[in-house]
Image (cartoon, grey):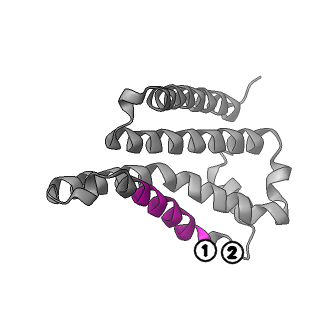
Amino acid sequence: MVDQYYIIIVVQDFFFVLIFFFSFTHSCLIVFNRRFHQHNNIFILNICISLICTTFYFALFFTMLYFDPRHLHAASTCSILFYAYNIASITTPFSFVNFTIHRFCTIVYHMKPFFKTKRWVIICIIIQRIGEFIVAIPYIFKKQQSVSNLYLYISFD
């Protein structure tokens, strides 16, 4: 008999694959079609890349957690996995916030030519990525078994 947790993992992985497929397809359209190389589409590409990384990480993490959770409880990988878990959790919302800030600056400061350049786009994306890594840094220095706590938090038992 198949347990509930296995069914949830299968459904969850199906949606992860679906999101991954659509994000990858959309990002390929933006990258390979020069007509789409505009500022807003570069931010949409940033969102797609964030979704690809997030879905890949969570699909891998939850599948490993279900099939063999012993690998996730090793002391050497625990803080790194929890750090990556936090980055994967915040990368997509940060991408949307980044795009919102870009749109705000281009609307409010529409007379400033700097906000219409690709340099501005690159600066926004770099600041977003640096911010993600800085926000998640405290999870590296945790002394407790973070993945064990995470496992207890998400288990359905």
Q: Give me the residue at 69% from left, 75% from top.
A: 142
In the rendered view, does 86 fall on the left or right side of 112?
Answer: right
Q: Which mark is residue 142?
A: 2
Residue to which mark 1 is pinned:
138
The correct choice, above or below, for 81 with respect to 144 in the image is above
Asked whether residue 135 is drawn in magenta, I would say: yes
Q: Answer few, some or many: residues within 10 Å of disc 2's Cα (few below 14, many 20 plus, some between 14 and 19).
A: few
Please report the bounds of the magenta region as a residue range: 122-137
Q: Position of residue 132 (x, y in %)?
A: 52, 62
Asked whether residue 34 is drawn in magenta, I would say: no
Q: Answer few, some or many: residues within 10 Å of disc 1's Cα (few below 14, many 20 plus, some between 14 and 19).
A: few
Q: Give me the residue at 29% from left, 57% from top.
A: 101
Q: Main secondary structure of the magenta part?
A: helix
Count of numbered badges drawn on the protein: 2
- SS assignment at label 1: helix
In the rendered view, does 154 fall on the left or right side of 36?
Answer: right
Disc 1 to disc 2, C-alpha distance: 7 Å
- SS assignment at label 2: loop
Name the residue type under label 2.
Lys
In this view, the residue in front, 12 or 114, is: 114
Is label 1 in contact with label 2 (beta carbons under 8 Å)? yes
Q: Position of residue 94 (x, y in %)?
A: 43, 55
The correct choice, above or below, for 4 with respect to 143 in the image is above
The correct choice, above or below, for 33 with respect to 126 in the image is above
In this view, the residue in front, 109 or 157, is: 109
In the rendered view, does 106 fall on the left or right side of 67?
Answer: left
Q: Give me the residue at 63% from left, 43% from top.
A: 58
Name the residue type under label 1.
Pro
Q: Position of residue 100 (x, y in %)?
A: 29, 52
Residue 127 falls in which quadrant of the image?
bottom left
